[in-house]
Amino acid sequence: MPRFILIPRFPEPLIPIAQTIPTLLYESIIYFISGVKKGLTYAPMGRIITIRPGNSAKAILSEVVTMFNNRFYNTMNQGPLENDALRRLAPSVFAEAKHGSRAETYKFIPTINIVDALRKEGFLPVFASESRTRSEDKKGFAKHLIRFRQHDGFSGVGEVKPEIVLVNSHDGTSSYQLSAGLYRLVCSNGMIVSDGQIDCVRVRHSGNVVDNVIEGTYRIVTETPKAIEHMDAMRGLMLTRAEQGIFAEAAKGLRWDGEEVSVNNAELLRPRRTADQSADLWTTFNVLQEKVLKGGVSVQNLNTRNSQRAREVKSVTENVRLNKALWTLAEEMKKLKAA
């Protein structure tokens, strides 16, 4: 069962608040501090929350519940997301009009229409997220990501489930984009296959958008077995410790600038669960993907020598970019090992 990790910065008394989250089937204990000047770093499953004086229990609970709904929603019961959950996780899915910056030629099709059309075809949404925007006038139009699984992908519990990853926005930052995805149940990692293996399908906001997205979805489905074959090949390749270190060095460079910060390779490669102890390429790739995207590793500023825990990647654009780049790295490592 998931556990929270508390990292106290000072020996002050903590006031526990117990909160049950029924949809996750376990109890969460959330700590906050009242009337003190120093703060506490709170790290549930690698996500860092700094609790400062004046933070109310309600605000802390709201952030943690939202985080866990994003991270673990239906990883316990493996059920599809209904519209209420989709609206909470990605409000822009329900936009009712295009952003004012879009030209007349822009054909507005609400993402929820695409979701409903895919549901009718047997593709059910299982995860949703949305990029944050600082521009008030773009809220409700931002780039969002939805992962779909075919209706028969819920029975049984295999290690990996094929998925369709849909990205869209209503502010001009993205067309409809469809990619192949793999969801690893053991660690709730959602990967996206690189364009080099399965071409990303892009549908512009013009013409028959709904039919084109459905057609693109089936095109991805027919290509997905290729990704499974590559995954099986990675499982059969064992890496030496030196090779794992090379992989980690390349992986961290995708997110962090090595001239500005330092991230320890050993920490990146340290598994968070016993199921990830193997040194095969597939498992190593999954461990690194989780650390790079979900954060939790120590990042030291080379100028100030101060360290902090890496945050989870929330940007849809960065999530997709890093996922595909990591997959490409794993593919290149596979080629080197198989040569």
Image (tube, grey):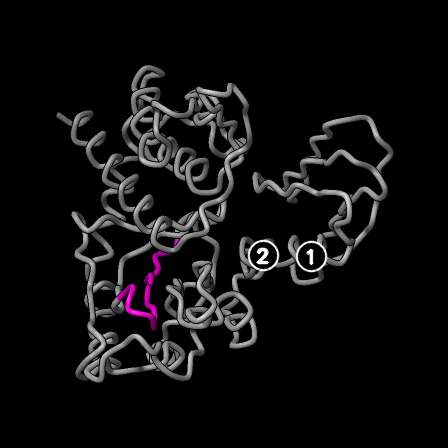
Of residues 275 and 181, the one nearer the viewer is 181
Q: Where is residue 154? Give x, y as percent.
A: 46, 64
Spatial separation of the CA atoms under disc 2 and disc 1? 8 Å
**Residue 270 percent coordinates (x, y):** 49, 25
Contact between marks 2 and 1 (CB within 8 A): the answer is yes
Q: Is residue 167 magenta?
A: yes
Residue drawn 39% across the image and 34% down it: 283
Classify residue 318 as left or right of residue 338.
right
Q: Is residue 4 magenta?
A: no
Q: Which disc number belongs to residue 25?
A: 1
Q: In the rendering, at what x and y percent does residue 269 appear?
A: 43, 26
On screen, residue 101 versus residue 12, left or right, reads left
Query: In the image shown, does 240 or 57 lie closer to the viewer?
Result: 57
Label 2: how many Cα within 10 Å (few below 14, some 14–19, many 20+): few
* Residue 130: image location, x then y, percent: 44, 62
Describe the element under mark 2 as helix, strand or loop: loop
Q: Quadrant of the C terminus?
A: top left
Residue 37 in the figure: left or right of residue 247: right
Q: Which residues are magenta?
A: 161-174
Q: Residue at x 20, y 25 (%)?
A: 337
- Seen as rendered, the residue at the extreme left is 339
Look at mark 2 in the image and give the residue it sits on: 76
Residue 128: mark in rendering = none
